[in-house]
Amino acid sequence: MGSFVLAIDQGTTGSTVALMDARGKLRASVNCEFPQIYPQPGWVEHRPVDIWESVGKSIRAILRKKICKPTDIVAIGITNQRETSLLWDRDSGEPLNNAIVWQCRRTMDFCESLRAAGHEKTIKRKSGLVLDPYFSGSKYRWLLKNTPGISRLLKSGRVAAGTIDSFLIWQLTAGDVHVTDISNASRTSLMNLKTGKWDAQLLDLFEVPREILPQIRSSSAILGRTRGVKGLPDGIPIAGVAGDQQAALFGQACFAVGDAKCTFGTGSFILMNTGSELLQSDAGLLSTVAWQLGEKGKPVYALEGGAFVCGAAVQWLRDGLKMIKTASAIEGLAAQVEDHGSVEFVPALTGLGAPHWAPEARGTLTGLTRGTERGHIARATLDAMALQNADILRAMEADLGKRMKPLRVDGGAAANNLLMQIQSDVLGRRLIRPAVIETTVAGACYLAGLGVGLWQSPAQVRDIWQAEREFKVQMSAAARRKRAASWNTALQRTLL
């Protein structure tokens, strides 16, 4: 039946498993959601067993589709929600606590203490990341300080730490392998971007012992092989791993310096390939590793800006305000009005990310009048999703000193044509949407396929990639400035 790559896309609200054939066509995908846990305001957790069960269910469900035999799967690729952190017992494999999700703000006071002690510049210079609860280092510290019996387990060498990629590889290999890829490691605040290794000074600042962390490996190489996974034969190589946003950059075939993409998911994230050059941002952006191909390959770097709340704002309208029944219904509701009607929604529901980095900010809804309709709030929500990205793009251009190329878009909300047109208008840039919109999955497949030689080079992958639609700017420059001014006024109120 041919050669297939199985991809695991372990996301914030669910796990997707997909199959790609040797021609680069996604043949099927299955998603399984799992519960979100909110112990108190600003805290977000996942039960690791829920994550692993959702992956297992999705694997078994896609195999039932009989697209291929399990023995036709030549490689597994993994892409994952980044920064989400957990500890588990090396002997039993049991999690020691719930995973702390990337959105969680519980470590804000500790991050402020590091800032007050004057460590922010050192952390940014070495890790490329700002000092924020978003990243994994402070989450590991919290777990180490707040997990019952942790001292005894640490002394006996039984504590393993990792981001979700590490946890999944551990589960897929029956505990044989404790590794992470370099793109995920670059999101912890603990890895030195220049050396690609755990940094002793950063480990000391975050109080994380080196021995509990995984080995850092390439994004495209054989990192381990399956053992004891229900439905899958033993010995399938796990050959591609990358954090979800880096996987999306790869899945969009953004292989040239200056190529950029925006993924519309729970949050929204713009990444731009900067090649072998490690750029330090002066405008509130992050420096990160995009990927590394092969064990001897050199890291490819990227600039990144992310908004914490994108699709999550639509989920809030659906689940919190009960304004819509389905997420996709927002497009029709927003299209019922001509514009936002003076309504501004700043969706700082979990603080503000790049380029503001204001974890204490909270969402605001302003400009309401007697004439405000549900459609205006829906339209203001779509506008906010796009305007946040415009702010990030301007910061990125300030770092580069030049205009970016047309932006490639992906993620679930990229299917919303109205949102894509708004995004093109407020950016003042042409947008390109790919034929395969599940680019995180595609990136994991491409990395894994390259890791086992199914494809020989990124150039061969680029030939597979295809555009589906372009969105051209329809808003005048004057109208764009006026829209940005209204947004900035609302933003400043939120930041007060």
Image (tube, rainbow, N blue to C red):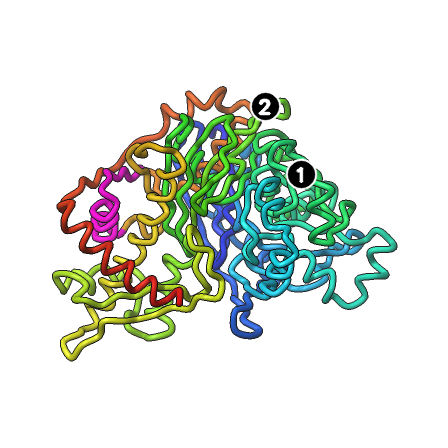
For label 2, the crowd category at 10 Å Cα-Cα, with few meaning under 14, some 14 to 19 and many 20 or more, is few
User: Residue visible at 45% across and 50% down?
Assistant: 30
User: Residue visible at 64% across and 64% down?
Assistant: 98
State which tag comes first along the sequence, 1 or 2: 1
User: Residue visible at 45% across and 38% down?
Assistant: 303
Residues 89 and 127: in front is 127
Q: Which kind of residue does numbered mark 1 sit on?
A: Asp
Looking at the rendering, the stretch of residues picked out in magenta corresponds to 416-434
Q: Position of residue 363 (x, y in %)?
A: 38, 68
Residues 306 and 439: in front is 306
Q: Position of residue 257 (x, y in %)?
A: 41, 27
Q: Is residue 259 left or right of residue 246?
A: left
Which mark is drawn over residue 297? 2
Circle 1 is placed at which residue position? 234
User: Residue visible at 42% across and 66% down?
Assistant: 349
Asked if residue 122 is positioned above or below residue 298 in the image, the reply reads below
Q: Which kind of residue does numbered mark 2 sit on?
A: Gly
Q: Does the magenta-highlighted stretch encompass residue 432?
A: yes
Q: Is residue 333 left or right of residue 442?
A: left
Instruction: Using the numbered discs, state the Cα–Cα distance from disc 1 to disc 2 in whole angstroms.
Output: 28 Å
SS state under label 2: loop
Asked if residue 102 is positioned above or below residue 470 in the image, the reply reads below
